[in-house]
Image (cartoon, grey):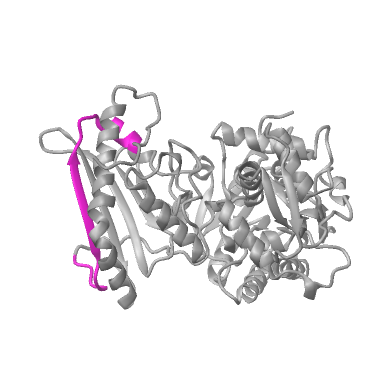
Amino acid sequence: MSSDEHPTESAPHGDGRLALVTGATGYIGGRLAPALQDAGYRVRALARTPRKLRDLPWAERAEVVQGDVTDAESVREAMRGVDVAYYLVHALGTGSDFERTDREAARIFAREAREAGVRRIVYLGGLTPEGVPESRLSPHLRSRAEVGRILLDSGVPATVLRAAVVLGSGSASFEMLRYLTERLPLMITPSWVNTRMQPVAVRDVLAYLVGSAAMPAEVNRTFDIGGPDILTYRELMQHYAAVAKLPRRVILPVPVLTPRLSSHWVGLVTPVPVAIARPLAESLRHEVVCREHDIAAYVPDTPGRPLGVDEALELAIRRVQDAQVATRWSSASVPGAPSDPLPTDPEWSGGSLYEDRRERLVDASPEALWRVVEGIGGEHGWYSFPLAWAVRGRLDRLVGGVGLRRGRRDAQHLRVGESLDFWRVEEIEQGHLLRLRAEMRLPGLAWLEMTVDRDEAGRTRYRQRAVFLPRGLAGQAYWWSVSPFHAVVFGGMARNIALTAAREENAPSSSPTAPDGTVS
């Protein structure tokens, strides 16, 4: 069995043709792009914020263009010279009219692909239950089905892949399964844990996506994709427990937990926020089992593929343990989260811009200090008043935010665009600057900036800046209500980061260890 979650190809078959990948900053798109390159395709990635791809190794070999699938002009430019176009985006969580947004974006994509002479469109949608009227489907699944129909009717040959639960390190489905099973040896669960489904490993999804690019022109249809195992969610949790060498879980389903209530239950226990947990829970209300396996005629099965549930779980768990998670569900920006860059004009005229600045000389090398800075968050914590951070994270979850549980992809290294607890990395200059943009629910925009350099005397210096751009009177009130705590939270943070760096100076090969939370 391969130790990798990515598909392996015996030889490149893309012949240098150009593939357009939308959603390249997301979970699937971020893995598909390098898989296409390995298969011999040139990749053009369409991204609203191209700098999020800056630190990804595959992006150096790709053409990255700025645009949005809702903007016809940018899609038209991105389609020029494209042989196969991948549609891997959706508007879920952007508001109550997300279905309309999905519909319009799909129509734009279909029209521009046809006008540009694109040879094939490939789309990854959701597996819908057999015999259930579309009106009874969740808005999430209903919109995915509609997008698939629009692309099939585009006049461009289309491959619409339909998957149920995708199992892979970092996927929202896997994270939900992992945290529920690991944290709750005894569970009172929604009744949907008894619904049958057919999970599929992420490496098989990628293999089907790559293989779909070479389908004959006469193929224009949907394909159900799944692994060889059909089981209930309750059985899937027991499989996870067995593979992870945990005691067998006691699972007690009750009928009173609606998808809405169960999504809050998932949000309480796992890092997956309610906005994402709810469509996942709703999609499990009905049985989602493949009705055919016709994809094998175009992307043939090989020994050991598609992977069974236990093999897929084993690969995913191993990659989490080895800190080799390529992309995570949180790779994509949180819908509705701010994306404005930090205002840099010192005479910025857009209104009040509040700052909290801290500076300390550090008895350690800049390299040792940078290791602490880049290792912040996740298991290492935030180096001051852990109770305050925990409470802020819980309050954010209660109002539908992401909270602190997203953690980080890698314990020691960060890259632009990835999530870090309830922050997102906006900028990183190795060894010098880390700038985080807040994605918690706030009446304004917030950033946290940490800088490592030397002063005029050559001493290591740590500088820290918290910036808040208030929105309306509520934003003003928020800043002044929390400013009395800044000395404890931000002052303690700067002090403890400096102390930790000095302590770690004598053990440069070890990862930074957060202090016990007391402010010295």
| Magenta-drawn stretch contains 353 | yes
| Magenta-drawn stretch contains 203 | no
Look at the image and give the residue range highlighted in magenta.
347-372
* Residue 250: quarter of image: top right
State the image coordinates of residue 442 (x, y, percent, origin top left). Answer: 39, 66
Determine the residue positioned at 57% across, 71% down.
72
* Residue 23: quarter of image: bottom right
State the image coordinates of residue 162 (x, y, percent, origin top left). Answer: 77, 57
- The answer to whether 21 appears left or right of 429 in the picture is right
Answer whether residue 389 is visible to the viewer in this image.
Answer: yes
Q: Quadrant of the C terminus?
A: top left
State the image coordinates of residue 31 (x, y, percent, origin top left). Answer: 61, 45
Toward the left, the furthest residue is 457
- Image label count: 0
Please tell me which residue lies in front, 58 or 183.
Answer: 183
Answer whether residue 216 is visible to the viewer in this image.
Answer: no
